[in-house]
Every structure is written in structure tokens, then in C-alpha cells.
Image (cartoon, helix red, strand yellow):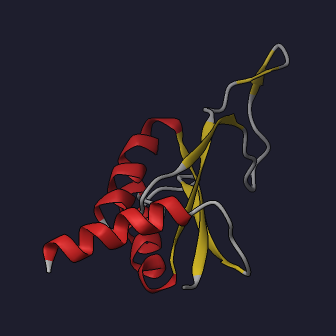
Amino acid sequence: MKFKLIVAMVADDKTDKVISTARELGATGATVITSARGEGLAPPKSFFGVTVEGQVDVALFIVEEHMSKTILEAISEVSNFKGSHGAGVALQLDIEDVVGLESQLSTIQDEIEEQL
């Protein structure tokens, strides 16, 4: 089985929506790194040395290759990447090898067999 890593950097108020959307489309879980800071084209504004820009979260999803593009596009849609400047970014990377998913894979296979 082939996997992709989806990395989504989104405003912290959109993280829960991104995760629930990815789950609805087949992602079995996520790892979230909170309180990251991003910089776009314009330097962040500060007030007495404290950055005023909002925090972003980095959500990591390991998903099966055949569903990765659908999940990536849905993340873009719910986060409004195209309609809002600086709303975030998401990308997918090939995974050469992965370990530690065996328990999830067997659970998914059991669920599929029950549905048949």
C-alpha cells in the first residue's frame, strides 16, 4: 500500500474543521503541531516586539495515495486558501516507507469486511 503525507498549515481557528473534513474523506487521524508562526510576503506586524499576527497550526495526515488529492483539495476549500490572502497552505509528499500503521490498517480492513 502506498501513502502520502499531507501537511496543512492553517489558522488555528480552522484546525478542527480541517481535521473533521479529512476524516470524512478517509483520513484515520492527524498529528497537530500548535502555535506555529508563518511569514508570507509581508513581514509580520509587531507591537513592542510582540508579533501581532495570528498563530497557525500544522496538521499532518498520513493517508492512502488514492485519497490524498481529494483530501488535499477539501482542506483547501474549507480553509478558503484561494479566496483569502494568507489563509494557509497545504501540500502532499510521497512516503517511501512507514511503520506503526499496522494496527490501523487491520482495523480498517476489518471494517471493510464487515460492510461486505
| Image quadrant containing the N terminus | bottom right
- Residue that appears at 14% across and 81% down: 116
x, y percentage for residue 28?
Answer: 42, 59
Residue 62 showing in the rendered view? yes
Answer left or right for 53 relative to 62. right
Picture coordinates of residue 69, whole percent (x, y): 46, 81
What residue is drawn where x is 43% and y is 62%?
75
Q: Vertically, is 42 above or below 63? A: above
Quadrant of the rendered structure where residue 96 is?
A: bottom right
Q: Position of residue 93 (x, y in %)?
A: 67, 76
Rendered residue at 59%/76% (across/down): 4
Residue plotted at (74% across, 31% down)? 45
For the residue pair 40 and 1, the one nearer the viewer reads as 1
- Asked whether 44 or 87 is in front, the reply is 87
Q: Residue 79: where, in percent of width, then height?
A: 42, 55
Q: Is residue 54 left or right of residue 77?
A: right
Residue lying at the far left of the rendered structure: 116
11 above or below 90?
Answer: above
Q: Is residue 82 shown to the viewer in this render? A: no
Q: To which quarter of the image does residue 92 belong?
A: bottom right
Q: Is residue 50 above or below residue 111?
A: above
